[in-house]
Each structure stands twice: as C-alpha cells, then as structure tokens.
Image (spheres, grey):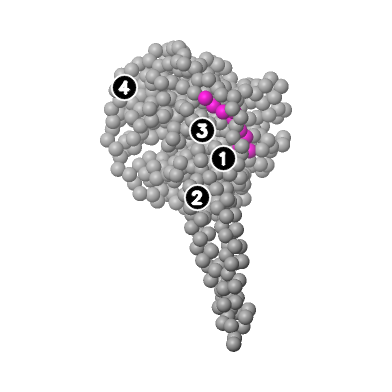
Amino acid sequence: MRVPDWVFALRRLPGLLSLIARLLVLLVLVAPLVCAAPASADGGVTWDAPVLLSESGAMVQDSTITADLAGGVHVFWTHMARSSEPASLLFYSFLLPGRTWSVPTDLFAGADYDTHANPSAVCDGSNRLHLIWTTTQALYYSSALAIGEQDPRLWQKPVAVVWADALASADLVVAPDGMIHVVYSRAREDTGVMYVQSSDHGQNWSTPLPLSTPLPNDRLAADAVTIAIDSEETLHVAWHESHAPDFLARQILYARSTDGGRTWPAPQPLSPLAESGVWNALPNLVIDGEDALRLIWACGNPVARCYRCSLDHGVTWSSEVTPLFATLIGSSGRDAVAVDSHGDIYWAGSLRYPQAFYSAVLSDMPTRARPQVVVSEMELAGLAWAHFPSMVASGGNQLHLVLVESDGGPLWYLHGQTESAPLEPPGQGTDADATVQPTLTTTATPTPVPTPVPGPVIGAASETPGVLRPLTIGLGSAAFFVAVGVVLGSRRRR
C-alpha cells in the first residue's frame, strides 16, 4: 500500500518547526538592534523665494530662529556692518501670521557689549521666548512673552549666566516645569562642556557643572554643543572634540541626565576617534515623534553625513550609518534640522556635487536617497554656498529657514510648506511672570553634583514596538515556511 505523500511531509515537520523556532529566537534577539536610518525623500517641501532679512552689505556669522505658539516666527542674528569697527550687534526681527517681517532692531541698543555671538532661542509651552548669546566675557540670557508686536522694551534686562572668556558655542532647552537648561563650551585646550540651570525664569543660575573633564595633557577642545529634552524629561547633550595639532573635530561625545540635570554619568563617544584630517564634527541631536533620538553629524574625508539613533532615551545606540545622502558631500557649518508637531524630521544644508543648498524629509527610506535642491548655483550662487542655516517648524506644515549667504554675508529667510496636515493654532496664553524684570546677578542656586558613573556601553537600541513588528513578521514567516516545507516534501516524494 502506497503511503500518501503528506505523511512523509509530516514526518519532516518536527525538524522544520525546530529550525523555524530557532530562527524566531534569533529574530527576536536581533530585532532590538534595528534602528532604521532616516533618509531623504525627493520633494516633500515646497519652498518660496528667499527674502533678505539683514542689510545687503551686512556681515552675519551666527543666527537662530524659533516659532511661538501662535505661529509667529522670531529670528536673531549677529550683525556687523562692513564699514564699522570690529564689533557686532544682536539684531532681531519677527514675522506675525499674515504680516510682513518687522524692521530689524538692535535688541539691546546701548548695552555695553563689544560683540555678540552664538545666539540660541526657543519658545516654551507658556509662549515665552528664551534667548542666550555670548560676548567676549560672558554668556547672557534674556526672555520676553510672545504677545504679538515685539517691542524691544518687552525683553527682560540681560542676565549674566556665567562669566568666562573664549566661549565657543551655547544651546538651551526649557522643560515643561519651566526649568531652563543651558550648555556651553569654550574655545580653549583642556576645557570641556559645561551645564547650568535656572529654576526662577533666568534670574539666578546654578554654578557651572562640567559634563566632560579633559586633562591638561589631552590637548583637545569641545565645541558645537547641542541639547535636547524628551518626553520623560531626560536631557541629552552632544558635542564634538577637536584634537591637536590641527584641532580639527575628530570625535562626537554624548551625555545624558535623567534627574533634571542634577547628575550626569560620564560622557560616551558616539563616533570613533578619527585620524588626523578626518572629520567627526557638528552634531545635530533631535527627538522625533516616537521619542527616538536622532543624531546626524559631518564625518569622513571627504565630508559626508553619519547617522545614529537611540530608541531607549539614550541608553543604547544603533550602529553607525554613512553616508546619509548618496554621493553628496561637503559641510558649511552645522546643518539645520527641525521637527514638526507630527514628529517628522526635516534637514537642510549646503552640499556638493552638484553645488546647491538642499533640503530633505527624513524618513525610514533607503539611506542613500538624494535630497531636493532648494537653491542651485545657477539661481543664486551665494545661497548655494550658504553657511550656518537654522530652521524651525510651526503650524504642523510650515518650515522657516534662515541661512547666511556664502560665509559671512547677509542673512536670508526661506519659507517652506510640507505635505503634512496643518494644525489649528492654540490661543495665546498668559504668563504670570511676564512682568518680571530680573537684575544682573550670578547668585547661584543649589549646585548640581556630578556622579562618577561610567557611561553606558555603546550597544543596540531597543523599543517594544520595534520588537513586536519583526516578531509579527517572523510568525507570518513561520507559517509560510511550514507551507513551503509541506509542499517541498510532497514534491520530493513524487
């Protein structure tokens, strides 16, 4: 009597199921290691013609842009007239919905500052604008409530956050409870990244706390520091370190605090220490709509873009991905990165070849896709080589971008509209502290204490949704493999 083919197939089933079970175990173990790299999708943003914000002959090196809760846009930049003495002013202009740009204003006219640099601005949940900037001797802070027309007299008297020279970069975030977190670096050997905070609307500041402590013989300096805060109010800070003898940025460092900045484990490297002449520089650290950390920086020689991400609030990180944008290379200062209210990430910066100013919508697409051209060299060469861009999103589908023509030219603004849905702007809130006028003081609040805890091991990011998706796929694959096994067994018997 001939045994049916399906019987022989069933005899092979236990071994086949054992193999499938092993594959599923491996799949579950590997799933947390997957952190899809964002890449650019062609198109995605419609950009308007550029608008000149500063005087046509002005020299601009630094700028920052932010948006308030009602859709107003606020730009700050360091202004130096070419015919003036070597000093700079801090200029400010704002754009209200349905209006045109305000006349640029010397924000703190008459103040005894010889220079302004490194402005950084944010708007908090109570619709208050926060601004920091550096001079040759100090890091300063001021704020104002975003209530429509912005008279310079609405801005609080500047407060010295810290007295220090050779300040190289600075950045800030504001927590939901109103705590202001500031990080800064100094352009000197053997100095690291410093952190300060204020719990009283910037009137008083804590004693500076070092996040990195290079030794005198290390011969390195930190710069390009950036800070972000996630939904769990974990603070994330990234920066690059430049090494002797050429002091080219050669490594990206990262630190985090889970207790509001009171303690900080030792920083960890997020890039290898590059050889002399090879870049690891200018990090951009942002948080997307799924609370994932996305780090993009200039890397290699020639300079491309590298990318890593963390799905567990900075505990572990994905493996490095490079390059991000096909064969396009180059760097003209830190790129611009913005996150909209939908959690989508947008990137902008100068690249070549071909030379142009580009933008990209970052999504889980093939990592080597080409971004779209915003301004080509044939259209406006100065903007095709633009430096130091800064970008913010508002209203759910609006992008606002400022960029410096060439290197040290005038400041331009571009408006972009994304394919996302617009949001209804919330009503303008009130601020109980709108009338507070802090005095110039550096009285310290309780000092945060560093914790000498070793930094987390660079590993693979993990996230529950990221595990469930591959697991679902794996179970479906198991069913498929069983069916294939039965069919193949049947065919072999024939």
Label annotation for residue 466: 2
Residues drawn in magenta: 263-271
Residue that mark 3 sits on: 236
Residue drawn at x 46%, y 41% is 291
**On the rendered image, what quadrant is the N terminus found in?**
bottom right
The kind of secondary structure element at disc 1 is: loop
The kind of secondary structure element at disc 3 is: strand
Can you give x and y, in whole percent of width and height, for residue 350 in the image? 55, 42
User: Taking 134 as reference, is 278 above or below it?
Assistant: below
Inter-mark Cα distance, 4 to 2: 44 Å
Label 4: few (<14), some or many (≥20) within 10 Å? some
Residue that mark 1 sits on: 316
Q: Nearer the viewer, mark 4 or mark 2?
A: 2
Label annotation for residue 434: 4
Can you give x and y, in whole percent of width and height, for residue 441 in the image? 44, 12
Residue drawn at x 44%, y 49% is 45
Residue drawn at x 53%, y 67% is 480
Can you give x and y, in whole percent of width and height, for residue 238 in the image? 55, 33
Horizontal side, residue 397 vs residue 181: left or right: left
